Every structure is written in structure tokens, then in C-alpha cells.
Amino acid sequence: MTTIATCSSIDEAQLIKSLLDAAGIAAFLPEEMTANSAPQLVFGSGVRVQVEDEDAPEARRIIEPPRASGNPA
């Protein structure tokens, strides 16, 4: 498993997981249960989003913010 993001909130992690699931990439949130039941325990470390190693490059591409084009508006 490869961690592709560490989120400050469970909501952010679940949004990323949803984006990846929609693209056909299985994503896992190892701290999901802890973040839902005792969020103070993951406050400092965050909530990890993990995918299978072979899916990591595509998953990173999906969650990467869009780059600005070089064309002025």
C-alpha cells in the first residue's frame, strides 16, 4: 500500500476516496474508524489515503490540483 495523501480531516479524506473510487481505483482510509469515533486521536497525524502500489501514479494524477495554463485570460 502507498499513502498518496494525508488529510487534516476525515471529510477531506473521504472526498479524495470518492474521487478515486469514481475513477475505478480502490482507496483505503486506515484511520477512518478512529477519526469517526475519536477524532482527537488523529488530530496531529492526520487521516491517510492509501491505494495499491501499482495504482499510486494514477491516483496522484487524479488528486493533483490542476496546473494553470500558460495562456493569459
Image: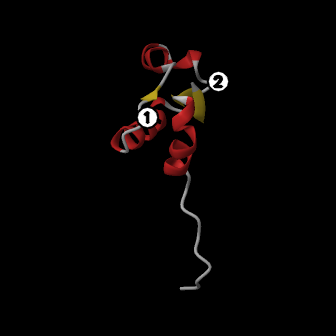
Residue tagged 2: 45
Quarter of the N terminus within the rendering = top right
**Quarter holding residue 43:** top right
Real-space Cα distance between discs 1 and 2? 15 Å
Picture layout, residue 4 above or below residue 45: below
In the picture, measured across the screen, residue 22 lies left or right of residue 53, that is: left
**Quarter holding residue 2:** top right
Q: Secondary structure at mark 1?
A: helix
Picture layout, residue 72 above or below residue 34: below
* Residue 13, image x, y percentages: 48, 34
**In percent of the image, x 37 and y 37: which residue is there?**
21
Residue 46 or residue 27, whichever sits in front: 27
Give the residue type that dot 2 points to: Ser
Q: Residue furthest right?
A: 44
Q: Residue furthest front?
A: 54
* Residue 52, image x, y percentages: 52, 29
Q: Secondary structure at mark 2?
A: loop
Residue tagged 1: 11
Give the residue type that dot 1 points to: Asp
* Residue 7, image x, y percentages: 56, 34
Q: Earlier in the sequence, mark 1 or mark 2?
A: 1
Q: How many marks?
A: 2
Picture layout, residue 25 above or below residue 73: above
* Residue 26, image x, y percentages: 41, 31
**In percent of the image, x 56 and y 28: which residue is there?**
48
Is residue 60 visible to the viewer in this orientation of the structure? yes
